Amino acid sequence: MAQRGHGFPDEFKGTTNDGSTNVIECYNSDEQLIARIDTLGNIFTEGHAGFTVISGTAILNFGEESNSAIISISNIFITNASIKSISFLNIETSESSLDDFTLNGITFNIENIIDNTSFDIRGSAVNDASGNFTLKYFILI
């Protein structure tokens, strides 16, 4: 269980350690857990009906004219059996516009899930892509 802090409304209340990663737990004023944030930058929010959303930002590097790119994401909460839904949000940056995602036919998927350890995000580009593409991922567990 997390150590509790005081004096903050709807925010940080303490940290706990799962053996490998410190986790910040955030509670509302009714002492209900509303989010966990690990030191790797992953955010886990408690949704309605008891679901948890794992979210974060990833940058995939397609190099020079490649049809795929993969990035591994460390995550202590994900398991193969827990995934309910996955969605991705393309992020426009100075390196890639939203049009670049469309013109290159880029789609994303998760794969290689190692329970309570990590997962990979694979980007596939029908028309080949080059450089970095940034996305936000949301995994409902």
Image (cartoon, helix red, strand yellow):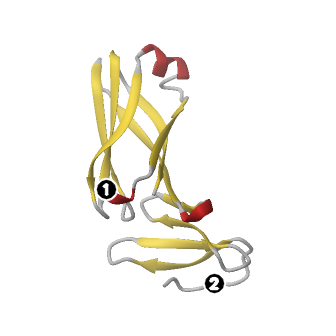
Residue at (69, 73) in percent of width and height: 28
**Residue position marked by numbered label 1 in the rendering:** 80
**Mark 1 or mark 2, which is nearer the start of the sequence?**
2
- Residue 97: image x %, image y %? 53, 22
- SS at circle 2: loop
Q: Residue 74, relative to residue 101: is it above or below?
A: below
Mark 2 or mark 1: which is in front?
Answer: 1
Q: Residue 32, relative to residue 41: is it above or below?
A: below
Residue 47 position by quadrant: bottom right
| Residue type at tag 2 | Gly
Residue at (46, 35) in percent of width and height: 134
Determine whether label 2 and label 1 are within 8 Å by CB.
no
- Residue 35: image x %, image y %? 57, 66
**Quadrant in which the C terminus appears:** bottom left
**Residue position marked by numbered label 2 in the rendering:** 5
Residue 132 position by quadrant: top left
| Residue type at tag 1 | Asn
Residue 105 falls left or right of residue 6: left
Mark 2 residue crowding within 10 angstroms, few (<14) / some (14–19) / many (20+): few
Q: Is residue 21 visible?
A: yes
- SS at circle 1: helix
